Amino acid sequence: MSQATMDGAVKAAPHQPEDAARNNLVIALLLVSAFVMFLNETIMSVAIPQLMIDLNITAGSAQWLTTAFLLTMAIVIPITGYLLQRFHTRPIFTASISIFSVGTLICAIAPGIELLIVGRVVQAVGTAIMMPLLMTTVMSLVPANGRGKVMGNISIVMSVAPAIGPTIGGFILAHFAWRYMFYFTLPIAIVTLVVGYLKVQNVSEPRKTPLDVISVILSALGFGGLVFGLSSLGGGGHGGSVEHAAEQGASMPAWVPVVVGVVAMAIFVWRQIQLQKSDKALLDLRVLTHGNYSVSLVTASLAMVALLGSSIMLPLYTQQVLGLDTLQTGMLMLPGGLIMGVLAPLVGRLYDQYGPRPLMVPGVFAVSAVMWLFSFVGTDTPVWLVVAAHIIMSIGLAFVFTPMFTAAMGSVPKPLYSHASATLSSVQQVAGAAGIALFVALMSLTSAAQMAEGIAPVEAMAAGVRASFICGGIATVLMLIAAWFVKKPEGEGPGEGFAGH
């Protein structure tokens, strides 16, 4: 399919409003499902120490609960572009939430770490399908001039669910065993599955698309290798313990999967360029020929480096340097997440009126200011200052994510929506893993060097945290430059237009 044909398809098939009630119900069910899945991603973040005690496992073994989840997401997401083109909305939704529910049940009844990891992998498969399905469905059903508001609701899912996950996890662990974290999400997932099965109607137009098995294998090696290798370089995101490093060193150097990932990714990209000429690519990279999408993709990647890196580092800092417990840490991060949720619909409406740049540039500036502020924290930093800074950072992120996703997805023609959402999600997974790796590696190396000079462990840890946030500050400066070039796509009403198609 030529580019002209794809652009023409969009103009020839404007949104039809007669089924607005049906479309709103479909989007609402997708939002609820995605909320549960995103909540699941972070609800376990405070449970690692308890799991180590209850299951008698090491920090490295426990970290596989996170690594396996990220790895599975990275492998499955690129395939969703094919799935969303090939199958109707209802079976894709049903499969996604069913797989997630089965994985949650496995986790709840798992007798040991091995089956618990299997459950997390199954959960990740369902989660990987849901987010591209949600974004593609919204882009297909919502008129261009109203997408900002709906994307604001998606931002609620992406911001509030991960933010309140540690708080809910901390509360559950304070009163119940760790298994209740899964017993908490399982009923919600099952109810969503039943209601979705009864109410979700097919709103997509599937077409027969060949699946290139070689591309699937290259994608798994490329995205999977990069995420696994970067996660290993970061010491797994839980402090980079010596014990964990020894386990990694005994099996495989972290640079090996990174190299495998880079080589496989290069071959994967070359193959997609060849296959997209006949419209057979697993991930159609013609989305990158749309300048606004590419700039938004760079901005999203840098945002994930800063966001996931800081989301790992702040709990480590508050618990290991300031001496807070898991519940206190969760409560500390809760206000920021809630504020992001409250602001998201407002930001969406502002996007529809003014476009992305007037929102994103001040937002990134606020995030950058907080990152540089955190590069000066120490053992005597007041907790109120950390809370206030996290709230400011959350406000900044609220003004970044909704405009960024809306501008990115609106910059490509409708036949490429599934590829655009899959590419965006895949790159975010790699960028998130890179952010965790960079932050934790800098923290670990700096702390180790400080302790080698005789500095007290807590002071050394604080120095490591400061070093990691310098990395975040640099990432946000680059993000500020990229955000300046994000414009509003053509056909989305008021705001900046984009003539770069």
Image (tube, rainbow, N blue to C red):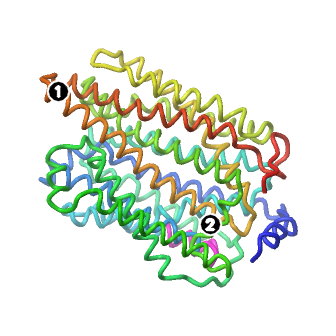
Q: Name the residue under label 2.
A: 285
Q: Is the magenta stretch mostly helix, strand or loop?
A: helix
Q: Mark 1 points at which residue?
A: 457
Report the residue that reaches farthest toward the right: 12
User: Looking at the image, which residue is at 31% across and 33% down?
Assistant: 327
Image location (x, y in percent) of residue 105: 34, 64
The quadrant of the rendering that contains the C terminus is bottom right
User: Looking at the image, which residue is at 59% across and 84% down?
Assistant: 210
The quadrant of the rendering that contains the N terminus is bottom right
Which circle's residue, 1 or 2, is located before the other in the chain?
2
User: Looking at the image, which residue is at 72% across and 32% down?
Assistant: 358
For badge 2, the amino acid type reads Leu
Image location (x, y in percent) of residue 344: 63, 38
For badge 1, the amino acid type reads Pro
Q: How many marks?
A: 2
Q: Residue 94 carries which label?
A: none
Q: Is residue 142 left or right of residue 235?
A: right
Image location (x, y in percent) of residue 248: 20, 56
* Distance of label 1 from label 2 (alpha carbons): 48 Å
Say what secondary structure mark 1 lies in.
helix
Q: In this view, does 375 lie to the left or right of 243?
A: right
Say what secondary structure mark 2 lies in.
helix
Vertical placement of residue 223 versus 244, above or below = below
User: Is 90 one of the magenta-colored residues?
Assistant: yes
| Range of magenta residues | 83-97
Is 25 in front, or is 254? 254
- Count residues near mark 2 (Cα–Cα under 10 Å), then give few for <14, some for 14-19, many for 20+: some
Q: Quadrant of residue 18?
A: bottom right
Is 195 in front, or is 467? 467
